[in-house]
Image (cartoon, rainbow, N blue to C red):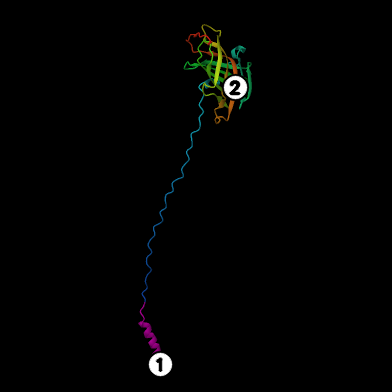
Amino acid sequence: MTTSSRAAIAVLTATLATPVLAVVPPAPTAAVPPARIAAVPPAPVAAVPPARIAAVPPDLPLARPAKAAADCLGGQGYLKARIRGALTADIDWRQYLACDGESRPDGSGVRLGFAGPPGPHRLRMIFGVRGVHEGAAARELPVNLTVLEEGGRIFATRGEGKCTIDDLRQQRQPGPGQTHTWRITARGFCTDPINDLASAPGSGRIVINRFDFAGVVTFAGGHQPVPRPLNP
């Protein structure tokens, strides 16, 4: 055996004597549970405040008087008023003036409605007067006043603390039997501005310093006139 053969056998023997490394399989990877997704609460919905509902003036039913004649009191009716502010008008209505009036359902007074000459923004004024009794003159009566632009704005005192009638007189109107229809003449004034019901307080106001009118009121039947002298 040659020297080279011996060397080759020695190398082979040494190789076979070397321990074989066992193939170790990779450690199983632990299953990672999916990340728990926190439930996102829905965005809070902002509370919407209820729409501001303007209180309807108690004497508004006469805004469009069904029985109003286009010739108020046969031409003897009238309405005078000076309006300034968000609405400007110098009212002196006689011709084409419509008017109507009635006692309040609760008997606490009367309401009189006036409609000016026809036009695109025809004005109407409604006076709710407390303490008026059939046939009796009176003074210093509280007034709930409403001014309407036809198809537009509504201005109202929304109470009886802003306007006053300082003199009111009545005259029975002719008719069959004992009628309960009276011609009402009055003059008065307002001490505070009157607000537009659709506007924020103070943003739309009118001022009516004085007013004078002659209109008609039909009291509920069956009530006898209550004679009351004027306050001194």
Do residues under tags 2 and 1 come within 8 Å of each other at their CB atoms?
Answer: no
Query: Does the magenta run of residues contain 95?
Result: no
Which kind of residue does numbered mark 2 sit on? Ile
Label 2 Cα crowd, 10 Å radius (few <14 / some 14-19 / many 20+): many
Residue found at the far front of this picture: 232
- Rendered image quadrant of residue 215: top right
Q: Position of residue 34 (x, y in %)?
A: 40, 56
Residue interval drawn in magenta: 1-20
The residue that appears at 40% across and 90% down in the rendered structure is 5
**Residue count near mark 1 (Cα–Cα under 10 Å), binned few <14, some 14–19, many ≥20:** few
Q: Main secondary structure of the magenta part?
A: helix
Identified at 40% across, 92% down, the residue is 3
Under circle 1, the secondary element is: helix
Please check the rendered image and state whether residue 15 is part of the magenta-colored stretch, yes or no. Answer: yes
Residue shown at 39%/90% (left/top)? 6
Residue 202 to residue 102: above or below: below
Q: 35 or 22, which is in the foreground? A: 35
Q: Position of residue 14 (x, y in %)?
A: 37, 84
Q: Disc 2 on helix, strand or loop?
A: strand
Position of 228 relative to 52 (above/below): above
Q: Earlier in the sequence, mark 2 or mark 1?
A: 1
Q: Which mark is residue 208?
A: 2
Q: Quadrant of the N terminus?
A: bottom left
Q: Quadrant of the C terminus?
A: top right
Query: The residue under label 1 is which amino acid type?
Result: Thr
Q: Is residue 15 visible?
A: yes
Q: Which residue is mark 1?
A: 3
